[in-house]
Image (cartoon, rainbow, N blue to C red):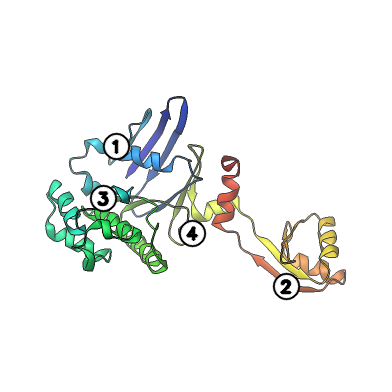
Amino acid sequence: MIEVHELTKRYGAVPAVQNVSFRLEAGVVNGFVGPNGAGKSTTIRMMVGLDRPTSGHCLIDGRPYRGLPAPLRSVGALLDVEAIHPGRSGRNHLRVLARSHGITARRADEVLEMVGLAGAADRRVGGYSLGMRQRLGLAAALLGDPAALLLDEPANGLDPDGIIWIRSLLRGLAREGRAILVSSHLMGELAQTVDRLIVLGRGRVLADASLADLVSRHAHRVVRTRTDDPDGLEKLLREHGAAVARRPDGSCEISGLTGDEVAVLAHRSGVLLYENTTVAASLEDAYLTLTQEARR
């Protein structure tokens, strides 16, 4: 288990992270989201000892990262794929890391195969595409077979097949009992991957809840309609307490009434509906609601 307690980081008078607390438990994929500058990367860097917190701490199975006897065997981190030496081959990069922890060269080859880089293992990293460097960074994170993974934008640079692959990989790693934190801006992808979501805004935790709970509390279903009389329908629905938003394609998005209630009102008033569809609440809607003030 990883426990983050009241982490704070200030640069002079400017607070980058303020009293951030959360827990990562075994077998759970946690999404880590927020607007640019919310403090996600700084928080992860403090968790693995790359930035010293102004106050607060992070404990990994009861120890700070710097106190772990073999960090790669406890926590695998993917932070900055550009930090890999461009003159080394992918295989040599991993073997150097492996030797620092007494990990066999065979394990380096295993993770290269796992991330789909076995055929490019002896090429220099400077010739890798961004997606290939992402895969190599993920291989490094997996090298010590760690119980926890901290991944900052792991799908960045991956093609659609790669995004589907990493989704499946993360779910599989969680089923093995690992604690996983994934920072990403891809809401649609997170909705298919994570169990919990930690939302940051202006360096503070805005929400920490299961995906289902967060969506149900902060997003609402809407009814989308198309009609032969949008002005008349809008007036009718507003009279019955609904909120109506007109879309550029001529359709209306309605909140405050169910699809059935809209259909009954339209029928009684002689308004013809071409479409009357209930649109489910989404993670993206919940995220935008939660971070509205922070984004301003």
**Closer to the observer: label 1 or label 2?**
1
Callout 2 crowding tier (Cα within 10 Å): few <14, some 14–19, many ≥20: some
Q: Which residue is mark 2?
A: 275
Residue under numbered circle 1: 49
Q: Which residue is mark 3?
A: 84
- Circle 4 sits on which residue? 191
* Of the image marks 3 and 4, the number of the one nearer the N terminus: 3
Q: Residue at x 46, y 25 (%)?
A: 13
Q: Quadrant of the C terminus?
A: top right
Classed neighbour count for the residue bearing mark 4: other residues with Cα under 10 Å, few (<14), some (14–19), many (≥20)? some
Three-letter code for the amino acid on which mark 3 is drawn: Ile
| Helix, strand or loop under label 4 | helix
Question: For residue 116, which quarter of the picture?
Answer: bottom left
Residue mark closest to the camera, 3 vs 4:
3
Mark 1 or mark 3: whose residue is earlier in sequence: 1
- CA distance for labels 2 and 4: 27 Å
| Residue most extreme to the right | 269
**Residue kind at label 4, given as amino acid type:** Ala
Q: Residues within 10 Å of mark 1 (few under 14, many from 20)?
A: some
